Image (spheres, helix red, strand yellow):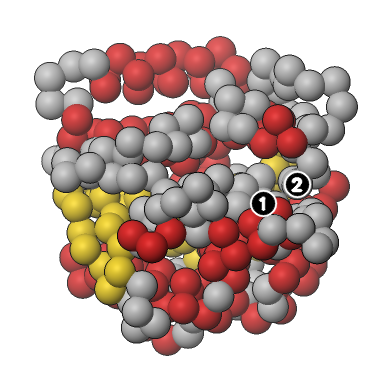
Amino acid sequence: MHKTKGWTLLLALAALLALSLPGAADARCGEVLQISGDGGDSFRAALAVPENAAPVAALILLPGGAGAVRLDDEGCPRSLAGNSLVRSIPLFRAAGAATALADAPAEFQGRDGLGGHRIEPRHAAAIAALVRELRRRIDAPVWIVGTSRGAISAANAASRLAGDAAADGVVLTSPVTVGSRGALPWTSQSVFDLPLERIRLPLLVVGHEGDKCLRSPSSNLARIAAAASSPRKQVAVVTGGPGSRFATPDLGACEGREPHGFVEQEAALAAGILRFVRGGNF
């Protein structure tokens, strides 16, 4: 993938330039949806759709970290702006996909954010409500995309939801697979705390060879796919990019501007995700 670095940089710069032009807020932000889950969670999501074309897919984006993007009334995130999925919204939209950036419910907007709530059935029920709302609004497949700790939320929904509440597929990028047992819920949990064998949706798992985040080593990616019962699945390991600031695995390397967040490779990541969503390979 390092061979595409030049194109990646050009596309990323073009996306950043677009955000500075008149009307660019429509590419970065979106219509604010108020979503109420069956489990009692109420949260907001920012829906952004492509211009002048019907969406090829609708992507529910679940960012990592605390999960609270603190959407303003124009659907713009005031937190986690450096998260890889938040940075990629203009790229997804330019490629023809609608995006629904999910915020954390009001009661989970504090320092720990979603914390241990990411593995709860109630959290999955909230995501189900967003799936149904997107199906009502958009005539296109609905996919759930979660990154880092957001991948825990995505795996939760993918393993619990069925029928019209289930998405058409799930993508896990830089998924958290290592926890610290006995610590706080948000540091102890990983995707392996969920019944991955119940995932029966198409599944894409993406990591970076140079990811030095202690919580998401690329060596664990294949274990996720092996555990899932998906009819179509792929593990993709990205290479190249500017590398990490850290010589050895570190919690500081779990940031969006690291290989963990596919820094300077956002365009290639978005393109690969959409190829898989549309039935091809990453």
Indicate the quadrant containing the N terminus: top left, top right, bottom left or bottom right.
Answer: top right
Residue 247 to residue 53: above or below: above
Residue pointed to by mark 1: 175
> Which residue in the structure is indicated by mark 2?
215
User: Is 22 placed above or below 177 here?
Assistant: above
Looking at this view, is 2 or 15 the one in front?
A: 15
The amino acid on which the numbered mark 1 sits, given as a three-letter code, is: Pro
Which residue of the protein is positioned furthest toward the bottom in this rendering?
163
User: Quick check: 85 left or right of 254?
Assistant: left
Q: Is residue 272 left or right of residue 250?
A: left
What residue is rendered at 35% in x and 19% in y? 16
Q: Nearer the viewer, residue 110 or 94?
A: 110
Question: Is 52 rendered above or below residue 41?
Answer: above
Q: Secondary structure at mark 2?
A: loop
> Could you say where residue 40 lies in the image, as x and y percent from the top left?
35, 79
Q: Answer yes or no: do the residues labelled 2 and 1 have beta carbons within 8 Å?
A: no
Asked if residue 202 can be seen in this view, the reply is no
